[in-house]
Amino acid sequence: FFDGDGLMRQLRFSENGSVHYRSRYVRTPKYLAERHANKPQMRTPTTQRPGGVLANIGRLPASEANTHAMVHAGKLWAVYEGGVPYSLDPDTLETHGVDLFEGVLKRSATFSGHPHPDPITGEIFNFGVAMGAGGINLRAYRIDPAGRMTHLGALPLPYISFLHDFGLSERWMCFPVPPMRGHALGMMLGLQTVFDSIEWLED
């Protein structure tokens, strides 16, 4: 369900009433490798890489850039829960590559597939999760109307959770942390997929 590659679709309406359609897959390393081999090559959130435990140990799921299209400041990105955004040409839909917003985003971090615009200021707000020596942190971001990103700060999380979305008000970003804990050890040892490693905390 979550393993499909990102596909951008475009409809253009001309002044004479004609309609033009274009679609392009986002050229992620996963897409290119699997297109070349014509079979699965990489680990995804719900599917292991072919080859058993040894082929999956220590490998993070590949980015599929498949959750949402973010259009802002005349630019286009494919955004995905488990990775950083990919920049695309808004006219041709050709993939430029990973966009780290001049280093504000870390390559190992994530950038949610559900950014929210502020209709008053014209800014975009979003978040991601980063793991480091200090533990698991939720990182909040703001993109100004010109497309420049600012890191607003980080908050420690009690456990690896499936943070899906957030609420945006005039003053706050509100994050519900569901009682779903991921077990990183089983996933990193190649024993489980990301989704198989998630446990529902009944208490």
Image (tube, helix red, strand yellow):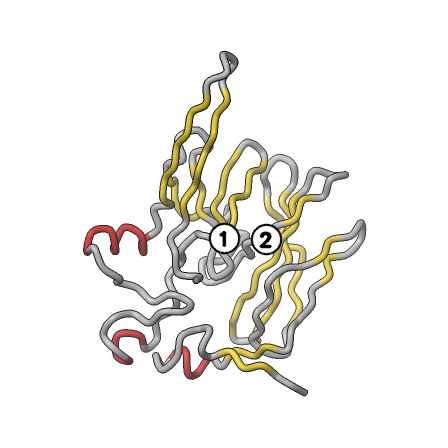
Are there few (<14), some (14-19), or many (20+) residues within 10 Å of tag 2? Answer: some
Are there few (<14), some (14-19), or many (20+) residues within 10 Å of tag 1? Answer: some
Question: Label 2: which residue?
Answer: 114
Residue 197 shown left or right of residue 158 in the figure = left
Q: Residue at x 38, y 37 (%)?
A: 23
Residue 39 shown left or right of residue 199 in the figure = left
Instruction: Report x, y in % for residue 123.
Output: 68, 42
Nearest to N terminus: mark 2 or mark 1: 1
Q: CA distance from mark 2 to mark 1?
A: 8 Å
**Amino acid residing under circle 1:** Thr
**Amino acid residing under circle 2:** His
Mark 2 and mark 1 residues within 8 Å of each other at the beta carbon: yes
Q: Residue at x 45, y 58 (%)?
A: 107
Instruction: Report x, y in % for residue 142.
Output: 65, 49
Instruction: Report x, y in % for residue 105.
Output: 52, 54
Quadrant including the C terminus: bottom right
Front residue of 100/94: it is 94
Front residue of 199/104: it is 199
What label sits on residue 67 in the rendered view? 1
Question: What SS does tag 1 mark?
Answer: loop
Q: Residue at x 38, y 40 (%)?
A: 96
